[in-house]
Amino acid sequence: MNIKRLQSSIVENLLILSLIFLIIDNSNIIFSQITITDPKITIEEQFTVPLKPDTTKPITHQYHLPDFKQYIGLELYLPPDYKTEGYTKLRPTLVNTSLKAINVNPNERIVYKSYKYTRDSYGYNQITLETDSIEYKKIITFMYNSAHIETKYIMDSNDNLNRSVVTLNHSPDTYDNYYTLIDVLYGQRLKDTLIKMDKELDEARKYFGYYRKESNFKEFDPESNFFLESSSWYKIRDKDYLFLLQDKKGDFLYSTHINIDFVSVPYYNNQVALLKGKEIISDPPKYSSEVKGYKSGITKIVEDDKGNKVEKDMWTRIRKGEVWYCEDVTLTKPEYELTYILKKGEQRALVPDEDIKRFKLLSVYNEEKALSQQNADIVKKRQLEAQKKEDELKEKKEREFLSLAISKYGKDIGSIVGKHKVQIGMNKEMCSDAWGKPFYINESTTINGTDEVWYYSYGNTLSFKNGILFMINQLK
């Protein structure tokens, strides 16, 4: 009786435990929740200014503005100023970080006059001077290292004022000089810089404009009659980026470009050391033209269709595989572009920097060619070794097949089958072993027995009558 009760109790406990586990397991299904996760992980880009800028590459425009930082610390050379007839080249705009005062050219006075317009009895305009004239002694401007060149006067009938149009240029020592790239301004830093300069200019307008007002702009003495020139400001105010430079005197300035006109000094020195006085070979990139023409730097006096004597540039064609001597790496006039002067016998070619990638040092080319030939020899040797192993394996299989055929069909028939050949009188098994299974069988049964035609590739066929080969059709 006790044993039965014990068994009954154990069964009840097992049932209770099973029910508990079932409830716990179902609770995971009933009470589990749908989760939503954003898998996006944001990693802030960290740009480290290189300790040394890359001297093997020229300065190029960067469409991702932070990439300009790779040039920070680079020494730049600004070639002499130039003017080429019929040729307009974008020049960088150079401005001071704050307004500066310069002297008025004594040969080009700047005078402010106010005129009054009246009509005489005949209806013609009469212009009379209404106030005394004011002569300006100095000019304040954002233009970097500037000098007053000339002044033109335009009469404005709307407010009866004689407008002075003042032309400034950079002083000669601005060019043929060296600068260092200190920083690149873009985004909020550029916006803050431009706002600061705009406020400075606005205060100057109040202080030195035609109608003076109270202003906090006290940097210059108003009694000196300063003329405010602001054309440089309008050239930079809408720019997306500016470059902060430092000149050899330690003064700071902004430039709108560094990849136009400016030349990287380390890159230039690297190219001189690498190519000047060396033999180079024309090796244009794949899919590029194998022939390209370049100016020779030699002009010839010829007569045009109108009988006038004119200068004509002589051109030189350089073909793939030609070896040339790099005589010099220099800036060539009139645009002062980095150029490689190449010579071959009496021929001469001026190759611009953007095309020097079409050439290689002859020594480097020969090394690459030798290495390429060496690699080709290695590849060929490996191919021959692989082919030899394949032939040996194939020969071994053929010997095993021949031995197996002789042991199966005897020496006479086995020697034929072992060489993958057939002859009249063989049965179907022998032919199948010799030639392999056909890809198609045409079978026909008549009163004389069963005929079969086995079809193989290239039009080869075997014909059987009652299982015995009686015809071979083999194309040769």
Image: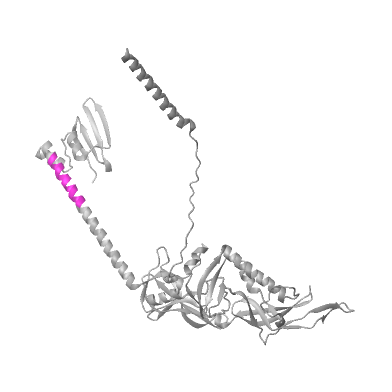
Asked where in the image residue 159 lies, by quadrant, the reply is: bottom right
Relative to residue 246, is residue 413 depicted above or below?
A: above
Q: Tell me where residue 177 appears, x and y as whole percent.
A: 51, 80
Q: Tell me where residue 305 appears, x and y as whole percent.
A: 56, 79
Q: Is residue 63 visible?
A: no
Asked where in the image residue 143 lies, by quadrant, the reply is: bottom right
> How are the residues colored?
one colour
Asked where in the image residue 198 lies, by quadrant, the reply is: bottom right
- The residue positioned farthest toward the right in the image shown: 121
- The residue positioned farthest toward the top in the image shown: 1
The stretch drawn in magenta includes residue 459? no
Q: Tell me where residue 244 appears, x and y as whole percent.
A: 54, 71
Q: Tell me where residue 290 appears, x and y as whole percent.
A: 40, 68
Relative to residue 440, is residue 257 depicted above or below?
A: below
Considering depth in this image, is 339 or 217 the residue closer to the camera? 217
Determine the residue positioned at 19% across, 50% down: 391
Considering depth in this image, is 118 or 199 the residue closer to the camera? 199
Quarter the N terminus occupies: top left
Q: Which residues are magenta?
A: 389-404
Considering depth in this image, is 325 or 67 the residue closer to the camera? 67
Determine the residue positioned at 45% across, 79% down: 330
Q: Main secondary structure of the magenta part?
A: helix
Determine the residue positioned at 16% across, 42% down: 401
All told, the count of numbered labels is 0
Q: Is residue 185 left or right of residue 433?
A: right
Q: Is residue 243 visible?
A: yes
Q: Is residue 300 left or right of residue 9?
A: right
- The residue positioned farthest toward the bottom in the image shown: 107
